[in-house]
Image (cartoon, rainbow, N blue to C red):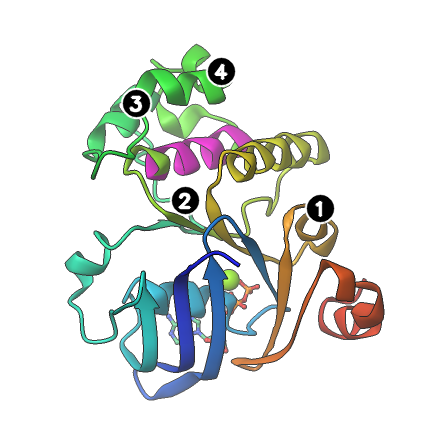
């Protein structure tokens, strides 16, 4: 087994008075793709936001490369090696594709060059002078991932990267993630689309009402098919 990059233990999280995470425990080891599966409102996004210290209040433990981040200020968490691609993508619509890519400095020696980004995402090269707001949903998702890869993350936190995209684009995103995985990237993939997640993930966590209610690896998939169906209705 490789070493853990992210270890979340007994994580509780709140939005103001609203207690939404009730003791989440999960980990991602170097090179793994881990899927966090759950229905609407289960706490998937909140778990990722908590890892980035973007929730109002958190308790428990979140270690990145063995280092506790629960008391760390938000701007420091961004430099621990976590790369967050939020559901809303966070790209700048009025800036060009290339400007979006140049906006964040590359952090550490692992940051991807723009040239390498364009190799992996040839359609972003083609559209590099276009305003990001004019890209298709799939291209915007790719730009959001590319921006984060520029910063050289050790672990990608991906929040529903296929949501609202046409099947052919979902397939393209799947190939990209498979390539990143083959290159050794560690990923925590939040999905409601279990069919997408099952092709990529090495391990699976089911989340319900802010708690992890099951976890299993690929070999355990079949034995847990009923549980998966309960949670995401496939
Ligand atoms: N900004 C917020 N303020 C208050 N409550 C929130 C906020 N965002 C989410 N919640 C609540 O926290 C709980 C978990 O929401 P979360 O967004 O983490 O779910 P999710 O699993 O990502 O769902 P979805 O699949 O719809 O994206 C839900 O009950 C939700 O209503
Ligand atoms: Mg969500």
Instruction: Choose between 191 and 80: the one closer to the eye.
Output: 80
On screen, residue 49 above or below 188: below
Name the residue tied to disc 2.
Answer: 89
Crowding around mark 3 (Cα neighbors within 10 Å: few <14, some 14 to 19, many 20+) is some
Verify whether residue 139 appears in magenta.
yes
Q: CA distance from mark 3 to mark 4?
A: 14 Å
Secondary structure of the residue carrying tag 2 is loop
For ligand 2, tell me if the residue under mark 2 lies within 8 Å: no
Label for residue 83? none
Crowding around mark 4 (Cα neighbors within 10 Å: few <14, some 14 to 19, many 20+) is few
Q: CA distance from mark 2 to mark 4?
A: 19 Å
Mark 2 or mark 3: which comes first in sequence? 2
State the residue lying farthest toward the front. 1
> Which residue is at a point 84% across and 73% down the rendered structure image?
226
**Left or right side of 153 for 25:** right
Label for residue 122? 4
Q: Position of residue 188 (x, y in %)?
A: 50, 55
Q: Are marks 2 and 3 in contact (CB under 8 Å)?
A: no
Mark 2 or mark 1: which comes first in sequence? 2
Mark 3 or mark 4: which comes first in sequence? 3
Q: CA distance from mark 2 to mark 3?
A: 20 Å
Verify whether residue 156 appears in magenta.
no
What segment is highlighted magenta in the picture?
Answer: 138-148
Crowding around mark 2 (Cα neighbors within 10 Å: few <14, some 14 to 19, many 20+) is some
Q: Are marks 2 and 4 in contact (CB under 8 Å)?
A: no
Name the residue tied to disc 3.
Answer: 113
């Amino acid at each position: 087994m490789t070493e853990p990059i992210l270890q979340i233990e007994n994580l509780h999280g709140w939005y103001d008075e609203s207690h939404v995470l009730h003791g989440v425990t999960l980990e991602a080891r170097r090179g793994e793709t881990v899927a966090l599966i759950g229905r609407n409102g289960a706490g998937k996004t909140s778990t990722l936001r908590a890892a980035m210290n973007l929730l109002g209040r958190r308790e428990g433990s979140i270690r990145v490369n063995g280092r506790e981040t629960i008391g760390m200020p938000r701007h420091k968490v961004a430099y621990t090696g976590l790369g967050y691609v939020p559901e809303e993508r966070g790209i700048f619509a009025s800036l060009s594709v290339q400007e979006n890519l140049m906006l964040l400095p590359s952090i550490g020696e692992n940051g991807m060059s723009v040239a390498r980004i364009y190799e992996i995402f040839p359609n972003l090269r083609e559209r590099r002078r276009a305003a990001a707001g004019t890209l298709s949903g799939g291209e915007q998702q790719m730009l959001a991932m590319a921006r984060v890869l520029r910063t050289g993350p050790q672990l990608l936190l991906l929040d529903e990267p296929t949501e609202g995209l046409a099947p052919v684009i979902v397939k393209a995103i799947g190939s990209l993630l498979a390539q990143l995985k083959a290159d050794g990237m560690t990923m925590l993939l939040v999905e409601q689309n279990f069919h997408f997640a099952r092709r990529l993930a090495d391990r699976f966590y089911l989340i319900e009402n802010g708690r992890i209610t099951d976890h299993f690896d690929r070999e355990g998939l079949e034995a847990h098919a009923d549980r998966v169906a309960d949670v995401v209705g496939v």
